[in-house]
Image (cartoon, helix red, strand yellow):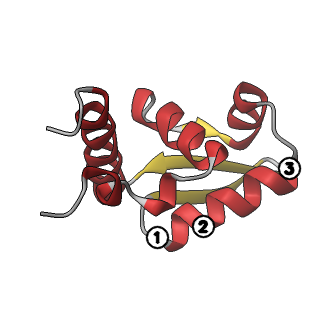
């Protein structure tokens, strides 16, 4: 049997991606600025990690203009929610001793 540690999702290995998904799991939609402030990130750091999660199919990035200002929001996809929940379940298994 594969050891439990190998069941963790590598997409969530980095603390920023873990934080992004945690915030998105608790909220239906989060703006770029809100997510940046919540996680204390730079624009570039958030953009690169969000792009990695979007490429994996876990986050949907929605870009639009409000008046003349760009407005970017993020939502977790169904696949992203499922993958993150499985990641959390695996962490709980590890906490219980790898059952």
Secondary structure, mark 1, is loop
Observer-nearest of 75 and 51: 51
Specify few, some or many for label 2: CA neighbours under 10 Å numbering under 14, 14-19, or 20 or more.
Answer: some
Q: Which quadrant of the rendered structure holds the N terminus?
A: bottom left
> In percent of the image, x 47 and y 61: which residue is there?
10
**Label 1 with label 2: CB-CB less than 8 Å:** yes
Secondary structure, mark 3, is helix
Image coordinates for residue 36, horizontal then vertical, percent: 76, 37
| First of labels 1, 3 by sequence position | 3
Secondary structure, mark 2, is helix
Q: Nearer the viewer, mark 3 or mark 2?
A: 2
Asked whether, in this view, residue 42 is left or right of residue 16, the answer is right
| First of labels 3, 2 by sequence position | 3
Q: Quadrant of residue 35?
A: top right
Image coordinates for residue 47, horizontal then vertical, percent: 75, 58
User: Separation of disc 1 and disc 3 at Cα?
Assistant: 20 Å
Image coordinates for residue 2, horizontal then vertical, percent: 20, 63
**Label 3 with label 2: CB-CB less than 8 Å:** no
User: Separation of disc 1 and disc 2 at Cα?
Assistant: 6 Å
Image coordinates for residue 41, horizontal then vertical, percent: 81, 39
Q: Quadrant of residue 28?
A: top left
Q: Which residue is mark 2?
A: 52
Observer-nearest of 7 and 64: 7
Q: Nearer the viewer, mark 1 or mark 3?
A: 1
Observer-nearest of 51 and 9: 9
Q: Which residue is mark 1?
A: 56
Q: Which residue is mark 3?
A: 43
Number of numbered markers: 3
> In percent of the image, x 81 and y 53: which residue is there?
45
> In percent of the image, x 54 and y 43: which residue is there?
18
User: Separation of disc 3 and disc 2 at Cα?
Assistant: 14 Å
Specify few, some or many for label 3: CA neighbours under 10 Å numbering under 14, 14-19, or 20 or more.
Answer: few
């Amino acid at each position: 049997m594969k050891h439990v540690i190998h069941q963790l999702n590598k997409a969530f290995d980095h603390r920023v991606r873990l934080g992004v998904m945690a915030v998105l799991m608790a909220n239906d939609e989060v703006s770029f600025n809100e997510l940046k402030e919540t996680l204390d990130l730079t624009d570039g750091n958030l953009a690169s990690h969000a792009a990695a999660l979007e490429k994996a199919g876990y986050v949907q990035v929605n870009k639009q203009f409000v008046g003349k200002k760009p407005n970017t929001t993020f939502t977790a996809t169904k696949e992203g929610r499922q993958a993150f929940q499985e990641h959390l379940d695996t962490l709980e298994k590890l906490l219980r001793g790898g059952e």
